[in-house]
Image (cartoon, rainbow, N blue to C red):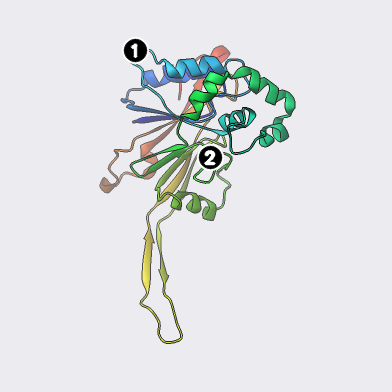
Amino acid sequence: MWAILSGIEGNIAAYEAVLADIKRQRVNVEELYILGDIIAANPDSEKVIKRIQNPLPGELEPQVCVGWWEEQCFALHGLGSTTEPTELIERFGKETAKLLWDSVSRETVQWLRNCHFGFFELDCLLIHGSSVSVSDELTPESPPWQMLDRLQRLQANHLFCGRSGQVFEYQLQGGSVNSSVMTLDSKQPVQTITAPKRRVVGVGNVGREPGKATYTLYSPNSDLAKGEALRDRLEFKTVYYGSKKGFGN
């Protein structure tokens, strides 16, 4: 079983609550993936980084990829694909950009620079945005052609993403396409391309909403040949913490 998180956004209390919920699971969680947005314009961002870097005895070592907030931080430090955090300033303003600068040390920025863009495990792509960029936001309202394009780019059957902050399962039904080439002299034989069932999964957001964190559990070992439905391999978890203490559901 994999635990897949995204969007801690410097919220150390939310991250601790999710780690505690993972420990309570009756299934054995073998891998912990964090799909970006670990930091944000939050003074506790450094605490989250230190917690990730130093798991407690018996805890899983998180596998981390970069997200939108990390990319904006790289731009602030002149290390990104752009020299200015344009998206950050347009969305949140210059004061937020200044707070992000103050919240994340240069040492942490260098550590984040060594994180992956995403992970490809079995037939699963785990990434913050999509195969296009960290800013690419996939939602339940995204058109099927866009979803299929993001999957096809890396030949993945399952794409797990965190950019939207939502939890959702978006299924693309399998099918086939017939194609042929006709020239002035002849017509080439028809070729049939078959596409399997595929899906995009929004894994939720840990730290954005105070008192409530969402994440995803996924088992890559379920045997679909025995008739198990896709949804049976996937579970969305909600954890309430702080003033709303309680177990996940």
Residue 147, placed above or below residue 23? below
Q: Nearer the viewer, residue 19 or 36?
A: 36
Amino acid at the residue labelled 2: Gly
Residue 243 in percent (x, y) is at 57, 12
Q: Amino acid at mark 1?
A: Pro
User: Quick check: marks 2 and 1 in contact, CB under 8 Å?
Assistant: no
Q: In the current view of this chain or complex, which residue is farthest to the left?
A: 226
Q: Quadrant of residue 100?
A: top right
Left or right: 31, with 84 as reference point = left
Q: Earlier in the sequence, mark 2 or mark 1?
A: 1
**25 relative position to 131: left or right:** left
Q: Which is nearer the eye, 76 or 117?
A: 76
- The residue shown at (26%, 46%) is 226
- The mark found on residue 202 in the picture is none
The residue at which mark 1 appears reads as 57
Residue 158, horizontal then vertical, whole percent: 41, 44
Q: Quarter of the image containing the C terminus?
A: top left
Q: Within 10 angstroms of label 2, few (less than 14), some, or many (20 or more) residues?
A: many
SS type, badge 2: loop
Circle 2 residue: 129
Residue 182, image x, y percentages: 44, 80
At 45% from the left and 82% from the top, the residue drawn is 183
Residue 40 placement: quadrant? top right
